[in-house]
Image: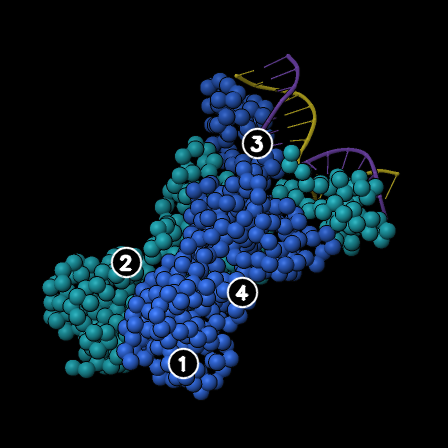
Chain colours: A blue, B cyan, C purple, D yellow
Amino acid sequence: MKSKRPTQADVARRAGVSRGTVSLVLNQTEYRVPISTETRERVVAAAQELGYMPNPVAQMLVRGTTRILGFYSFEETFPYSSEDFYYPYLMGIEREATNQDYNVLLFTRKLAELTQNGYSDGMSSFRLADGSILVGNYPNPIILEALLKEGLPLVLIGRSTFPTNVIDTIVNDHRPCSYAATRHLIDLGHRQLGFIVDDLNLAYHKERLFGVRKAIDEAAGAKLTILSREELSSLENFRQALRRNEISALLCADRKLFTPMIEVLQKLALRIPQDLSLVFLVINTWNMPFTTPTYVKLNRGIKGKVAVERLVQRIAGTLDGHEQIQVPCEFVIGNTTAAFTR
Amino acid sequence: MKSKRPTQADVARRAGVSRGTVSLVLNQTEYRVPISTETRERVVAAAQELGYMPNPVAQMLVRGTTRILGFYSFEETFPYSSEDFYYPYLMGIEREATNQDYNVLLFTRKLAELTQNGYSDGMSSFRLADGSILVGNYPNPIILEALLKEGLPLVLIGRSTFPTNVIDTIVNDHRPCSYAATRHLIDLGHRQLGFIVDDLNLAYHKERLFGVRKAIDEAAGAKLTILSREELSSLENFRQALRRNEISALLCADRKLFTPMIEVLQKLALRIPQDLSLVFLVINTWNMPFTTPTYVKLNRGIKGKVAVERLVQRIAGTLDGHEQIQVPCEFVIGNTTAAFTR
DNA sequence: CTGAAAGCGCTTACAG
DNA sequence: CTGAAAGCGCTTACAG
């Protein structure tokens, strides 16, 4: 029923040559094997007349390479409201993939559902890509280990529980920007700062705190109060925490605390930045209640680009060891911070 | 040097069976051909021990299907500041692709660069996908025609210069929301409305104008003034145009006029919405100077979803004709519109 | 219940 | 300069 596509053999038949010759002509390998112009023209004409297009799958099989970079996210993209979009990464990845002449394959099926099969069948789709980029912080170690064991070229954007010398990771260095943000507040005259965070065990939060502490330590009379999720649970608690420590500026280190914090601040009728200066050490630019917040930009696109660069090298086999690559953040001053007024 | 991956033959050898049997066992086709539990277990064990993963490329070749949906954008994504992001589409596409058990391949190489080859070699990568979704309004007809001629399953998100019965397109119906937006302004007491647009020859702008006109015609004393890009070119021109027509509310129909219009309004020191109500008939949510504008939401995600649904049916061959599918927009009331005060 | 064979559509040595 | 053959790693009738 369905009109079959013309195949290489059809072209060969029509041009009156062998299949090998068709392949040679159409792959522009003129330099390697010389072919008479006459034959060449006959083949090209036949291909054109037949509307021939080589089957890329067959080419991949015989070439052993697909020129595809895989992309997999451990974080859920759905529902739409998710704060863990990976599109900024994808942007950088796609751009760099274009440069390197790779297409990008988005793996949609979740690995968790795929690992059921005894011999890890589900992962086989990863073999479709010459190498893959994973996104996610501290992904399930079992799954990650299974992936690593396969020996496929892999780069993780984010941190993992594995040693940095067994897997390539791309991460942000949070220290310089946390330092810069804190300096910014101190320069504005603030001395009593709050640092709000959910889980201080996580490496990136430790880094942030490190940068903040450094700036605090350098400033005369500066004091830091660490606030946790519990503080946000009740309006009164939070108000007290701010009052007791005379906090005039708040550094929000945790994406998860973003929404609850904003809610609490609104309920307390605190004006930003008149009553309280606010710095977002992490932020989702697509979901901002402030048009121009003071925040740390994560440069996800750049991380994506760096990931591709690393992956391509890994595929080429020009790399021996694995390592953690740090990408700088960027501190952006907006209007959620203002000079301290007593 | 590089340790070759185990192949099906390796598993067969180890399990002491034929390659066909390995395939049968590992593909879970137990129902079709009965295989003894003993053999089955031996095969699975061998596969596990060897860390065998089937080569998906070989499977694709023999199956003749890839379970990949291609994605191609006619619009440039770069530079980053581009207003024509396609990520909202991708979101809906990916989600629905997950449901339908397809992976998504992003074609990164631009078609324009690929069409050089006589026999349109570059397009062959489209054959890697079982079907593809294209995004873009009025894409280059030559390229689109070449694509259509290949007879590949295709769905275009956007409008084209081709008749609607030769290609499946997914478009927004702009009339209802333009009508609703205009009604909203009229209900707020506005009577002198401006409609600012760049190129009224485009179908979607005509549709918008159609909806607006309908609401205008229904309201006593309502008047519409159409403003063009020229009006924006000089501050004085624009001020005059607003004054002369006593315009108290503006409907912005064109994405391209967004930035220049905002600039002009700011320079004229017009307060929104006190001095002028503003409705965006199209908007990029990731680039809003107003936190909650009154605007028409394009539901790109839904268009992506619909495109996948249509494409999957096309691939299945359950469709005969082609058609234009309309997806409704959504009118969202924000705070850039307010009641008319003389 | 299992094996041997053909074939998916290509590319690439290898002969001539 | 060109053809015949082997092979990429699978699946699927077809025999037994």
Amino acid type, residue under disc 4 in the picture = Leu
- Dot in front, 2 or 3: 2
Alpha carbon of mark 1 to alpha carbon of mark 3: how far? 77 Å
Q: Position of residue B297 (x, y in %)?
A: 38, 68
Q: Name the residue tied to disc 3.
A: A8
Q: Secondary structure at mark 4?
A: loop
Q: Is residue A268 visible?
A: yes
Residue B148: which disc?
Answer: none
Q: Residue at x 53, y 26 (%)?
A: A24
Q: Secondary structure at mark 1?
A: loop
Q: For residue A131, what is the image quadrant?
A: top right
- Dot in front, 2 or 1: 1
Q: Name the residue tied to disc 1.
A: A245
Q: Name the residue tied to disc 4.
A: A202
Q: Quadrant of the N terminus of chain A?
A: top right
Question: Pointer 2 and pointer 3: residues touching (CB < 8 Å)?
Answer: no
Q: Residue at x 60, y 55 (%)?
A: A162
Amino acid type, residue under disc 3 in the picture = Gln
- Circle 1: is it few (<14), some (14-19), or many (20+) Cα within 10 Å? some
**Horizontal side, residue A122 vs residue B117: left or right:** right
Q: Position of residue B84 (x, y in %)?
A: 36, 56
**Horizontal side, residue A136 vs residue B164: left or right:** right
Q: Quadrant of the C terminus of chain A?
A: bottom left
